[in-house]
Amino acid sequence: MTTASFPSRRVLIAGGAGFLGSHLTDRLVARGYQVVIADNLSTGRLENIAHHLVAGRVTFIHHDVTDPLTLEVDDIYNLACPASPPHYQADPLQTALTSSLGAMHLLALAKKTGARLFHASTSEIYGDPEVHPQPESYWGNVNPIGPRSCYDEGKRFAETLLMDARRQHGVDVRMVRIFNTYGPRMRPDDGRVITNFITQAMAGDDLTIYGKGEQTRSFCYVDDLIDGFLRLMDLEQGPDTPVNLGNPGEFTVRELAERVIGMVKSGSRIVEHPLPKDDPRRRCPDITLARTLLGWEPKIALAEGLLRTLQALQKTETVVPAFEPERRVA
Ligand code: NAD
Ligand code: UDP
């Protein structure tokens, strides 16, 4: 956590009770910022931010971003959207609306207040990429009508909307394309590969690789990612392009499974399950822009990040304080 002193800012974090949002909250509270979290708690959990709620350092609003929101703020972070494929595919219409209409409502708030608008986009906008690694200039290869489209196309539309708002109305928009990020506070039932493998290995169950496990991903530890968020928001002026943030180390899913079994010292076996439709075959960020623009580089190696995630998942006791969030009717 940073100890430097920052002039106070009023910050709204949409999706702040989720995995990434709660880590961002920690960092902004440590700067002395006034943080308001708006979240519908669909995948987020109050226990992720309980330490701030108890200390009275964060205000929580139970709110769905598909409804408009009015608030006086200096900065807006839009992280509201389920990120795990099984979660975002469970209610695809809601996902499509959250990522599109939600972005539109937060844009309206940014226009009204003059706030900086940070938007969490995704490597999924590259779809099943035909260019490797993926630079920001690559337009992607996305199925517009498949099971992942509610997320991919919703996020692509949000990028279009925000870039147009920047050009047409001069809104101060800053966007990151996040590549697979993991760490403490991911839900054990999150459904993404790292939490699935660790929880399976902890239980001595089979590790479920989808397909042959030859597909690749690049895994970024959460602290590194949030550092990139802050560097982008601290720039005097945002760039006129989204910025890739991710760890360029690339692993097959089978390699990941073997590493997790080795780390947990589990007797688990690896079993193959059917590959989900449209599952991207390779994914790895080109982070040249983040390096030059932000001086940003991931620091936490996969082995260290996996260990920290394992230790967090092993802590079974979670304390949720008696806390009744303010309910806002839109
Ligand atoms: P998460 O599911 O833990 O967090 C999402 C948060 O948004 C949750 O607190 C959830 O309750 C809230 N939310 C969902 N729909 C909402 C709605 N309609 N209104 C209000 N709140 C809503 O996921 P995460 O991994 O923390 O992802 C955060 C953001 O980062 C998302 O926008 C996601 O698309 C993006 N992202 C994450 C990753 C990653 O690897 N973690 C990768 C790419 C993009
Ligand atoms: N995956 C897997 N076993 C699991 C969960 C996921 O083999 O239990 C694979 C999935 O098919 C994909 C990769 O791991 O190829 C990453 O999946 P995840 O859901 O974490 O994120 P994605 O990058 O697909 O959004």
Image: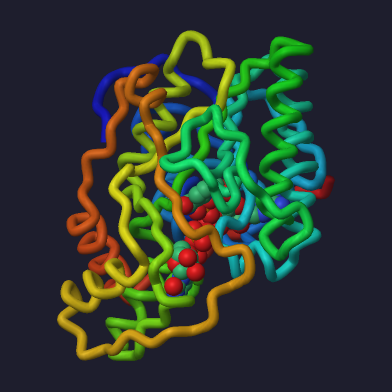
Residue sticking out furthest to the front:
130
- Relative to 179, residue 206 above or below: below
Q: Which of the two residues, 129 or 88, is positioned nearer the viewer here? A: 129
x and y, in percent, of residue 300 in the image: 22, 46
Left or right: where 287 falls relative to 262: right
Count of numbered circles on the image: 0
x and y, in percent, of residue 325 in the image: 63, 55
Residue at 79% x, 47% y is: 66
Residue at 32% x, 74% y is: 198
Left or right: where 24 falls relative to 315: right
- Relative to 267, residue 314 above or below: above
Dividing the picture into quarters, in which one does residue 133 lie? top left
The answer to whether residue 126 is visible is yes
Residue at 49% x, 84% y is: 273
The answer to whether residue 63 is visible is no
x and y, in percent, of residue 2 in the image: 27, 30
Q: Which of the two residues, 124 or 328, is positioned nearer the viewer here? A: 124
Dividing the picture into quarters, in which one does residue 215 lie? bottom left
Residue at 57% x, 22% y is: 241
Q: How is the image coloured?
A: rainbow
Left or right: where 111 falls relative to 83: right
In the rendered image, the quadrant that contains the C terminus is: top right
In the rendered image, the quadrant that contains the N terminus is: top left
x and y, in percent, of residue 278 in the image: 62, 63
Q: Which of the two residues, 194 or 277, is positioned nearer the viewer here? A: 277
